[in-house]
Amino acid sequence: MREDTLNYRQLFLNDTPMIDLRAPVEFKQGAFPSAVSLPLMSNEEREKVGTCYKQQGQDAAIKLGHKLVSGEIKEQRMAAWKAFVEENPEGYLYCFRGGLRSRTTQQWLKEAGADYPLVTGGYKALRNFLLDEIEATCEELPFYIVGGNTGCRKTPLINSLKNAVDLEGAANHRGSSFGRYVTPQRSQINFENKLAIDLLKLRNTGISELILEDEGRIIGSVDIPHSLHLKMQQAPIIVVEEDLETRLHNLLQEYVIDMHRSHTEYYGEEQGNHLCAEYLLSGLDKIRKRLGSERWRELRKMMEQAIATHDKGEGYSQHLNWLSPLLEWYYDPMYSYQLGNKAERIVYRGNWQECQDYLHNIK
């Protein structure tokens, strides 16, 4: 059997498949991208064992755990673990601290003829390693920030660079009122885990600087780690500048066409149409107070007309009727104000291609 690992770096660099033995409620709160939830105990079983531990001590809790996970229940869970082991012979298993749950499962698998290693320190050690990776990145690398008005395709620019990390991709949210995707946003813990693994993989390539998109402290419902955001607030800024027509075309594609396609592919035509309309209207409703009631009503009316038009199969162009004033009334003034407060940090301005060339040549 391979030795129990302390090399957490390689586990994440290699996207090593892992069995997460924690209860489903623990897994839901946060896990790792390459881990699969195959719990030793259900939520209810874990609760019973925990209560027993508090009232009667460890020995009684262990005895109860073996009683609860026995017979047909144990056979079913063993079958799932063995199937995973067969499909992922280079994998690992872990529980919260690398303690009783993982050692028990490891022993049961060994008795069934499957020698499988556990992660020393378990989930907690892996999680702390990732949090340390974020801190190390902040301490060791200079940052550059990509800014620019809404619709300048900053995220595709980030994703075209070899020394950049996509914060919005890690969050699974675009960071605006229209920022959510069809799939749910990651939890805070899963966002931090994904971000840390992205940083780890990038730093492993030997990069000498890190490029990030200009973001507020919050992306959707998750917070950017404090140390990372603090350093972002001090970094030089490269500003992407595109004309209004180009930006409107980009927003029409991103907010409307791509999202409509995603909804209909995910939910089917009828439900997808309805949910896409709900996504657009709710996005506008989120900024009602900032727009003011009169402008919000005007934009909502235009949006509803555009939705009705494209539902009839008459194209998406009418969405430009609300996208244009949305930029003029809301996004552009907001970003101009924010960028004005960072003017002393701007080191370059140019169109998308010029900024990409500039960022490619940063040393």
Image (spheres, grey):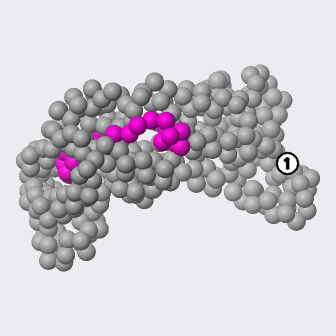
Classify the position of the C terminus by image quarter: top left
Please give the name of the residue rendered at 85% of the width and 63% of the height, measured from the top-left corner.
54
The residue at which mark 1 appears reads as 66
- The verdict on residue 141 being magenta is yes
Please give the name of the residue rendered at 58% of the width and 42% of the height, measured from the top-left corner.
132
Instruction: Reply above or below: 292 against 46.
Output: below
Residue 234: image location, x then y, percent = 37, 48
Q: Residue 41 versus residue 179: which sits nearer the camera?
A: 179
- The verdict on residue 340 being magenta is no
Residue flagged by tag 1: what amino acid is it?
Answer: His
Q: Total label count?
A: 1
Residue 263: image location, x then y, percent = 30, 50
The residue segment tinted magenta is 134-156
- Using residue 330 as the reference point, say whether residue 2 is left or right of it: right
Please give the name of the residue rendered at 14% of the width and 47% of the height, measured from the top-left corner.
247
- Using residue 80 as the reference point, say whether residue 139 is left or right of it: left
